[in-house]
C-alpha cells in the first residue's frame, strides 16, 4: 500500500457513468450494524479521532497538492463547505443501512465520483492523480488513530466483538470507494489492522508532520476552523499540537514523564557530546515512504526540555490553547462516565444538526471566527494560500 505501484495506480479505472457499486462478497450485515451501534455509543470520541486523522491526511504531499490545486482552494469559504461536507458524508455512513438507494449508498457513490472528477482535473493541471495510496492514507484518517489509541478518546465497547465489527465496517467502506483489496488498511482482523496502522504512522505520518509540505498549516487551520465552527469548545492550535503528539512527532510531549523521557532520549542520541548540540529530529524517526517533503531541519536541544515552560512547541501555544490542551485528559475521563458520555455525545449531535439543518448558522459562525482570526493577525482570508513560514513566524 506504500509501494510505488500503489502511488501510480489511479483510485478508479472506470468512468463515472460506468460505476456500478456492489457490496463485497464477505460483507456481514450483522457486523456492519454492530459497528454502527458502536459508533453512536462513541460518536463524540470517534469523530474527534477522525478530525485529527484528517489533519494527518493534509500532511501527505500528494494529497495536499490535489487539494491546493482544486478550484478556489485559497478561498476559506468554499474550503469550509468542502470539509464540512466530508464529515457529514462520513457520518451519514453510520445513519442508514448500506443498501442500494439508501443515503449511505448514494453518499459513497458521490464520494467515488468526486474522486474521479478530481483526478481528471488534477491531470489537466499536471498535478498528478488521486492514487490507491492516497485513498488508503485517507482511509487511515478515519480509522487509524481510533484503533491505535482508543484510550486517548475515551472509546468504550458495548458488545463483544465491537472492534472486529468496526474494523469490518471500514474495510467495507474502503471497498465501496474503490480501494483494491490488497491495499485496504483494514485487514481480516483488528490486530492485523493495528499492525498496518502502526507502520503507516511510522513511515508516513510521523515524518510528514515532522516536516509538513508547504501550505499544510493554512489548509489544516481552514479545516479545523470550519469543522469546529458550530462547536466553540474546539481550539485549533491545541488540536494541531494534539495531532502531532498522537502521531509521535519528536518534541511533542504531554506529561512530565514524557518530557523527562524525551530529554533522556536526546542525551542518549548525543552520546556524550555537548548538550548545546541540537539533535536532528529526523534521526529520531523513520524515513518517509512518500517523499516530496521540504527537507527543513528541526533541531531539538536538551535544554529546551528542562521544564514544560521551555518546550518550544508548547511554549508557542496561546494561553487559551494551553488551557484547552490541559483539559484533554479531563474530557477523556469525563467521557468514560455515564453522564459525561451522554453530555458530550449530545453536544456533538447538536453541532452536527446545526451543520445539517441550519447551514447558514454554521456559515455565519465560521465567518465570525475568520473575522476574529484576521483581527488578531491570524491569516485566514481570501488573499491566497499562505506559506507555512508565516504561521511559524506568528507562533514565535
Image (spheres, grey):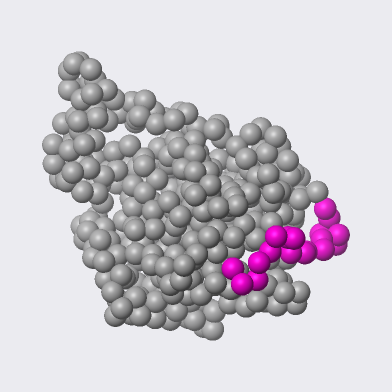
**Position above or below: 209 against 280:** below
Q: Looking at the image, which is closer to me, 13 or 82? A: 13
For the stretch drawn in magenta, what is the main secondary structure? loop
- Is residue 346 something one can see in this rendering? yes
Q: Looking at the image, which is closer to me, 23 or 137? A: 23
- Is residue 81 something one can see in this rendering? no
Give the residues in magenta: 14-31
Q: Name the spot of residue 31 as percent of width and height, x first.
A: 59, 68
Question: What residue do we see at 53% from left, 47% from top?
Answer: 192
Question: From the image, which quarter does the N terminus lie in?
Answer: top right
Q: Name the spot of residue 394 as percent of width and height, x first.
A: 31, 47
Query: Most extreme residue toward the right, as rendered?
Result: 18
**Position above or below: 39 against 127:** below
Quadrant in the rendering for residue 228: bottom left
Q: Name the spot of residue 114 as percent of width and height, x first.
A: 70, 60
Question: What residue do we see at 23% from left, 17% from top?
Answer: 271
Amino acid at each position: 500500500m506504500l509501494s510505488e505501484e500503489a502511488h501510480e495506480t489511479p483510485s478508479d479505472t472506470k468512468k463515472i457513468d460506468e460505476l456500478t457499486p456492489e457490496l463485497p462478497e464477505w460483507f456481514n450485515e450483522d457486523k456492519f450494524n454492530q459497528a454502527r451501534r458502536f459508533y453512536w455509543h462513541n460518536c463524540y470520541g470517534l469523530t474527534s479521532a477522525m478530525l485529527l486523522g484528517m489533519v494527518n491526511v493534509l500532511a501527505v504531499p500528494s494529497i495536499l497538492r490535489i487539494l491546493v490545486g482544486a478550484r478556489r482552494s485559497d478561498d476559506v469559504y468554499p474550503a469550509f463547505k468542502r470539509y464540512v461536507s466530508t464529515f457529514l458524508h462520513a457520518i451519514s455512513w453510520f445513519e442508514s443501512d448500506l443498501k442500494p438507494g439508501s443515503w449511505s449508498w448514494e453518499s459513497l457513490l458521490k464520494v467515488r465520483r468526486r474522486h474521479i472528477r478530481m483526478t481528471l482535473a488534477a491531470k489537466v493541471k499536471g498535478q498528478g492523480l488521486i492514487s490507491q495510496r492516497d485513498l488508503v492514507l485517507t482511509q487511515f484518517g478515519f480509522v487509524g488513530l481510533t484503533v491505535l489509541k482508543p484510550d486517548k478518546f475515551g472509546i468504550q465497547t458495548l458488545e463483544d466483538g465491537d472492534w472486529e465489527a468496526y474494523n469490518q465496517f471500514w474495510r467495507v467502506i474502503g471497498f465501496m470507494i474503490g480501494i483494491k483489496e490488497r491495499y485496504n488498511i483494514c485487514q481480516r482482523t483488528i490486530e492485523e489492522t493495528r499492525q498496518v496502522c502502526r507502520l503507516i504512522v511510522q513511515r508516513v505520518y510521523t515524518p510528514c508532520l515532522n516536516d509538513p509540505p508547504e501550505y499544510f498549516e493554512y489548509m489544516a487551520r481552514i479545516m479545523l476552523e470550519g469543522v469546529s465552527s458550530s462547536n466553540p469548545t474546539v481550539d485549533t492550535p491545541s488540536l494541531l499540537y494534539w495531532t502531532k503528539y498522537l502521531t509521535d512527532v519528536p518534541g511533542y510531549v504531554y506529561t512530565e514523564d514524557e518530557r523527562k523521557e524525551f530529554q533522556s532520549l536526546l542525551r542518549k542520541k548525543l552520546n556524550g557530546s555537548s548538550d548545546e548540540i541540537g539533535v536532528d529530529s529526523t534521526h529520531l524517526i523513520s524515513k518517509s515512504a512518500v517523499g516530496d517533503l521540504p527537507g527543513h531541519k528541526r533541531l531539538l536541544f536538551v535544554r529546551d526540555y528542562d521544564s514544560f515552560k521551555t518546550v518550544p512547541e508548547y511554549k508557542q501555544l496561546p494561553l487559551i490553547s494551553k488551557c484547552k490542551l490541559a483539559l484533554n485528559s479531563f474530557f477523556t475521563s469525563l467521557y468514560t462516565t455515564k453522564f459525561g458520555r451522554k453530555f458530550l455525545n449530545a453536544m456533538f449531535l447538536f453541532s452536527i444538526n446545526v451543520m445539517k439543518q441550519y447551514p447558514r448558522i454554521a456559515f455565519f459562525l465560521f465567518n465570525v471566527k475568520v473575522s476574529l482570526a484576521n483581527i488578531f493577525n491570524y491569516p485566514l482570508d481570501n488573499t491566497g494560500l499562505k506559506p507555512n513560514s508565516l504561521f511559524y513566524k506568528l507562533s514565535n
